[in-house]
């Protein structure tokens, strides 16, 4: 019996350099166009690509060739990948070991001078090749950077027979660069760790049975089962079951959120103690978590104003340095200084003045700051916005849905005469149960929550925008606004008018309840404040934000009441969306750095006009996620002080790194010109400064708000 071998083969590769979701799309698109390819799945989070192909039409070698043409190096094994990732570090350490042997042999007199020089040459070759290779790539792209300066300095030293100094320079430069990359990789891993939260497989109900499938094979409408303690594989909507879900990796919320039928769940979140069944609403590649990660990647790659300034400075500085070193060498020779001494001073000056720390100082801070924000449920879409957060002096807020819950709630039951609060509420709910008005829903919901019985009605008559008339147990009942009573020719008693004014002065809407021609009670309804609004505003004040403005579409009296309760410095009421846009424009003109905080829907024009547009609760709001400059992934305003505090920390660290890097250039250049430090010491100090600014930036991964701002839990840093 002959066993037939299937021509379908599935192979995995590890790809060096695949570090963003755009890489996934490029690789999948290009490989799928090859004849014989049956399927491609790339995943940048673990830098892998899986290819299924027909071995009768294409082979592994041709696939690898195409991958290399795309600029990636396929590594078939994890050891090979480890070697690729640590190549520069291994080359540096190899040269360093040989260099140490040479120094030791010279110091102890174990080898002749010629043999010691041979060891220095052997130490020079590996790092010289590695750094020279990078320099050549830069020159082909017409980019003159620090690699060129270091290569020129090292080969210049070698040309004088100073192989040991040249090897030391390249060794420390290469080692410093490798350590910098490892340090910055720590910040990148903080973001990539989000992608690793999503399970690879999902339990799915299909064809009347449960089966386990890769998440990539799920389609919209599939029913996934999430068992206790498991992570949600896809974005979806719960159709059955109840549980608590930990959404902190995505939204930064410190407490789990209760989920039941109709609630949204997100890929990567952790299910609690209940079983949930959810209908898939997005494909794996379009999940909220994947979209957030993609936006974070783009933000980390976006240059801030300071970074752009540094890049412009460096583009001018490097050529000027080369000209300056040539002039220094020429001047020294014209003054009669020996060539070797003049050349060595010029090379030392070249190393001392190289702006490596300057070019690393700002991007490392932006990379780390964006990563730290993402870890706490704050999506900052670029370095420019991160810097602007730190410079804010005024914050404007939308009221409804931002400072308040965005839904009306019953706050007061005021019976009149011999009527009770229960009677007033039951009669009002009887009529309001037939209305779709938000205020009516609030009354009915409150009545049901109190466990009260809602009596039946008949002969109902709607007065659109004003109220409802109906009969309950043969009595004519009226429920509505003051206008409803006025239109009926009824006059309100002075006591009722005073109570209405008192409610409105508190920012509440008064609903009148009447039987026949008599008002029997009032119901106060208001959009209640978010419980964290006061805490967030207090936190902003402690951070130095002295001006807070509320922009509202409510009448001036209601807006004043809310502003007074929160302690806002000013407010504007009766604003349409276009009015909010104009107000924000005026604020930006007068204060320059202004943030607008809203829900990202009807506030979109104002968010776009502000220096920084901040959307609240963006995990549930696609429009806000795309439109805002900064997105708070949970509807918790306490994230706002954290975002601004982080922005200010970023500003401080960028300034510190600029002072360190520019100060070191001036100091070391001066010492080098005076010949007070040799080339070896200069390289050591130069690379030490570069590592110092990288380490300073990484401190932001441990950023917490100052003690007392919001409290430990609210700060979101526990």
Image (cartoon, helix red, strand yellow):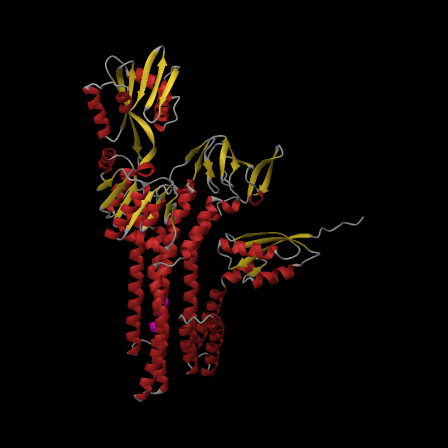
Furthest-right residue in this view: 1
Say which quadrant the C terminus sits in: top left
Q: Is residue 348 left or right of residue 189?
A: left
Q: Viewer-proximal residue, 506 or 178?
A: 506
Q: In this view, does 303 lie above or below 483?
A: below
Q: Where is residue 31 in the image (x, y as percent from the top left)?
A: 60, 56
Q: Is residue 346 visible?
A: yes
Q: Give the range drawn in magenta.
A: 352-356
Q: Is residue 135 left or right of residue 656?
A: right
Q: How many numbered marks, from 0 up?
A: 0
Which residue lies at the image location 43% right of the left edge and 70% below the top edge?
143
Q: Position of residue 636 (x, y in %)?
A: 34, 40
Q: Is residue 5 left or right of residue 223?
A: right
Furthest-top residue in this view: 474
Q: Is residue 698 left or right of residue 46?
A: left
Asked whether 355 falls inside the magenta stretch, the response is: yes
Q: Can residue 682 be seen in this view?
A: no
Q: Is residue 335 above or below residue 195?
A: below
Asked whether 384 falls inside the magenta stretch, the response is: no
Q: Position of residue 430 (x, y in %)?
A: 37, 18
Q: Where is residue 459 in the image (x, y as percent from the top left)?
A: 39, 15
Magenta-highlighted stretch: main secondary structure? Answer: helix
Which quarter of the picture shows residue 575? Answer: top left
Q: Viewer-proximal residue, 692 or 135?
A: 135
Q: Viewer-proximal residue, 170 or 291?
A: 291
Q: Viewer-proximal residue, 327 or 589?
A: 589
Q: Is residue 36 above or below residue 216?
A: below
């Amino acid at each position: 019996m002959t066993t037939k071998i299937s021509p379908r083969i599935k192979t995995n590769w590890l790809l060096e350099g695949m570090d963003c979701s755009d890489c996934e799309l490029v690789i999948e698109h290009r490989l799928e166009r090859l004849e014989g390819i049956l399927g491609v799945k790339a995943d940048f989070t673990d830098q892998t690509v899986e290819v299924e192909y027909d071995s009768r039409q294409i082979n592994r070698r041709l696939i690898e060739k195409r991958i290399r043409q795309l600029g990636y190096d396929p590594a078939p094994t994890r050891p090979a990948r480890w070697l690729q990732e640590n190549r520069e570090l291994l080359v540096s350490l190899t040269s360093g070991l040989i260099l140490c042997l040479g120094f030791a042999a010279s110091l102890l007199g174990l080898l002749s001078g010629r043999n010691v020089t041979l060891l220095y040459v052997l130490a020079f070759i590996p790092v010289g090749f590695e750094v020279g290779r990078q320099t050549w790539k830069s020159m082909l792209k017409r980019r003159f950077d620090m690699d060129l300066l270091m290569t020129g300095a090292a080969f210049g030293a070698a040309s004088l027979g100073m192989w040991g100094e040249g090897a030391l320079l390249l060794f420390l430069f290469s080692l410093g660069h490798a350590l910098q990359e490892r340090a910055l990789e720590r910040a990148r891993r903080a973001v990539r760790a989000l992608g690793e939260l999503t399970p690879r497989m999902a339990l799915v109900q299909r064809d009347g049975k449960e089966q386990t499938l890769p998440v990539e094979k799920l389609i919209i409408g599939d029913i996934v089962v999430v068992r206790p303690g498991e992570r949600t594989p896809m974005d979806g909507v719960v159709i059955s079951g109840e549980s608590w879900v930990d959404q902190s990796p995505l939204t930064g919320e410190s407490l789990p959120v209760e989920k039941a039928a109709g609630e949204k769940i997100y890929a990567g979140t952790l299910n609690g103690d209940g079983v949930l069944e959810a209908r898939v609403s997005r494909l794996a590649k379009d999940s909220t978590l994947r979209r957030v990660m993609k936006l974070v990647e783009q933000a980390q790659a976006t240059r801030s104003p300071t970074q752009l300034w540094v890049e412009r400075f460096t583009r001018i500085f490097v050529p000027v340095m080369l000209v300056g070193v040539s002039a220094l060498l020429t001047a020294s020779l014209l003054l009669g200084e020996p060539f070797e001494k003049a050349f060595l001073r010029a090379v030392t000056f070249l190393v001392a003045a190289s702006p490596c720390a300057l070019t690393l100082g700002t991007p490392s801070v932006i990379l780390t700051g964006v990563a730290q924000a993402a870890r706490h449920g704050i999506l900052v879409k670029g370095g420019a916005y991160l810097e602007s957060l730190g410079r804010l002096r005024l914050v404007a807020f939308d009221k409804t849905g931002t400072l308040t819950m965005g839904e009306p709630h019953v706050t007061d039951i005021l019976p009149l005469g011999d009527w009770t609060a229960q009677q007033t509420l039951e009669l009002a709910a009887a009529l309001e149960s037939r209305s779709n008005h938000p205020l009516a829903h609030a009354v009915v919901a409150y009545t049901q929550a109190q466990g009260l019985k809602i009596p039946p009605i008949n002969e109902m008559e709607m007065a659109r925008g004003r109220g409802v008339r109906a009969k309950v147990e043969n009595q004519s009942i009226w429920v509505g606004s003051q206008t409803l009573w006025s239109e009926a020719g009824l006059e309100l008693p002075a006591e009722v008018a005073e109570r209405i004014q008192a409610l409105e002065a508190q920012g509440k809407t008064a609903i009148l309840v009447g039987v026949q021609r008599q008002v029997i009670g009032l119901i106060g309804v208001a959009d209640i404040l978010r419980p964290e609004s006061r805490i967030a505003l207090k936190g902003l004040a402690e951070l130095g934000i002295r001006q807070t403005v509320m922009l509202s579409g409510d009448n001036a009296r209601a807006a004043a009441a809310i502003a007074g309760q929160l302690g806002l410095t000013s407010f504007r009421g009766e604003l349409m969306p276009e009015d909010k846009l104009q107000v924000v424009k005026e604020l930006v003109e007068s204060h320059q750095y202004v943030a607008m905080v809203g829900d990202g829907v009807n506030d979109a024009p104002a968010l776009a006009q502000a220096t920084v547009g901040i959307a609240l609760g963006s995990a549930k709001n696609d429009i806000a996620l795309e439109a805002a400059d900064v997105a708070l992934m949970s509807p918790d305003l306490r994230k706002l002080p954290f975002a601004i505090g982080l922005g200010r920390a970023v500003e401080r660290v960028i300034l510190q790194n600029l002072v360190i890097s520019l100060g070191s250039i001036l100091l070391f250049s001066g010492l080098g010109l005076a010949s007070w430090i040799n080339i070896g010491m200069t390289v050591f100090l130069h690379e030490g400064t570069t590592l110092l600014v990288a380490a300073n930036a990484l401190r932001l991964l441990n950023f917490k708000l100052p003690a007392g701002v919001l409290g430990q839990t609210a700060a979101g840093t526990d």
